[in-house]
Image: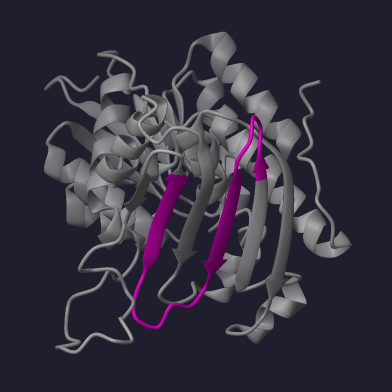
């Protein structure tokens, strides 16, 4: 702990989301920030902006901090989280924790055995609308759950380099939706059927990936979830959910900033729409980081925190979806814990 009582936080990964977290950390006044990135110039620039220090050696950074926030490319998460857990550093890692089920289990077990906080970045857990929806489902207000419909569509696709390192659209963008089905309902998913196409980003075909996908999920105990995700939504970033039950039908994300237009409506079309995930979930990202700082500082856990188990389960569903596209069949998620 810094003498002034502020946590020394290491930020590993200084891209767009790293900048967002660095800004939040700096604004909170609760952290002294150190930065590392494989591009040293990015780390130096960000450190200068937030009054922190830049490190060219990630292990040296980890040896000087109280907690670490990992926002680097997906394929780097495994090694970085492993190094942080070796030092028993409270660790926040953007989703997914890893791209391998067994490694996710191994890292989670290390964290559990050492009682080290390990958070995975599922910021929708901290969104007020999603949180209230979960409470109302748990309270039985919707009655028997019939269907869940989820939409996750980027306004524009990330750089091809980033997409190549993400695993697939199922392991990247749609991972949030797989997690949400479980988190909102409190139930597991037994089978997945998925389809995909390449329509906006032709280069994805060479990566065996897709930019427009849909998945149907069977939910344990009854109920069906239908998910769509895509890399291009021309009017803006679009994340919504509709839940239909025997007593009620509720939605989250449908408001004046939803990026779609009514065919029969007449009026101005100049409303401000969501630009990207940082815009849509700004409040959720801040709440999530505040919760992690509290946990890292030993002042309490947050039940909304995304865990390695959440990442494991969502990854298993993403892998099932990938297999379903190849086989044109329903696929059950693999469980390597058995």
Q: Residue at x 38, y 44 (%)?
A: 124
Q: Is 287 placed left or right of 235 in the picture?
A: left
Q: Residue at x 59, y 67 (%)?
A: 163
Q: Is 226 placed left or right of 331 in the picture?
A: left
Q: Horizontal and vertical percent for residue 285? A: 29, 45
Q: Residue at x 15, y 88 (%)?
A: 267
Looking at the picture, the colour scheme in use is one colour
Query: Looking at the rendering, in which quadrant would you find the C terminus?
Result: top right
Q: Horizontal and vertical percent for residue 101? A: 72, 36
Query: Which residue is nearer to you in this view: 337 or 222?
Result: 222
Q: Horizontal and vertical percent for residue 176? A: 50, 49
Q: Horizontal and vertical percent for residue 175? A: 56, 50
- Give the residues drawn in magenta, as a range: 218-244
Query: Which picture quadrant has residue 162?
Result: bottom right
Examine the structure image and report whether residue 230 is included in the region drawn in magenta: yes
Considering every residue shown, the one lying at the far front of the view is 246
């Amino acid at each position: 702990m810094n003498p002034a009582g502020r946590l020394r936080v290491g930020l590993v990964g200084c891209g767009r989301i790293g900048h967002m977290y660095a800004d939040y950390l700096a604004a909170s006044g609760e952290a002294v920030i150190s930065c590392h990135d494989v591009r040293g110039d990015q780390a130096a620039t960000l450190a200068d902006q937030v009054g922190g220090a830049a490190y060219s050696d990630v292990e040296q950074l980890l040896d000087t901090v109280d907690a670490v926030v990992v926002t680097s490319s997906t394929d780097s998460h495994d090694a970085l989280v492993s190094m942080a857990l070796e030092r028993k550093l409270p660790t926040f890692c953007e989703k997914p924790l890893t791209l391998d089920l067994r490694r996710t289990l191994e890292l989670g077990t290390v964290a559990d055995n050492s009682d080290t906080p390990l958070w995975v970045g599922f910021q929708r857990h901290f969104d007020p609308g999603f949180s209230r929806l979960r409470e109302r489902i748990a309270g039985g207000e919707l009655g028997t759950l019939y269907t869940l419909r989820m939409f996750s569509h980027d306004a524009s696709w990330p750089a091809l380099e980033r997409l190549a390192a993400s695993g697939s659209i199922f392991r990247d963008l749609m991972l949030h939706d797989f997690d949400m089905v479980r988190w909102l309902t409190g139930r597991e998913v037994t089978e997945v059927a998925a389809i995909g196409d390449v329509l906006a980003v032709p280069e994805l075909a060479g990566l065996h990936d897709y930019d427009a996908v849909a998945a149907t999920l069977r939910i344990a105990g009854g109920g069906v979830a239908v998910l769509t995700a895509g890399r291009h939504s021309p009017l803006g970033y679009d994340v919504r959910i509709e839940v239909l039950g025997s007593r009620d039908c509720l939605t989250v994300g449908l408001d004046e900033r939803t990026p779609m237009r009514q065919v029969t409506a007449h009026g101005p079309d100049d409303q401000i729409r969501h630009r990207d995930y940082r815009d849509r979930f700004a409040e959720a990202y801040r709440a999530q980081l505040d919760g992690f700082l509290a946990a890292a500082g030993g002042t309490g856990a947050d039940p909304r925190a995304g865990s390695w188990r959440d990442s494991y389960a969502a990854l298993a569903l993403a892998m099932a979806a990938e297999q379903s596209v190849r086989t044109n069949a329903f696929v059950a998620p693999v469980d390597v814990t058995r």
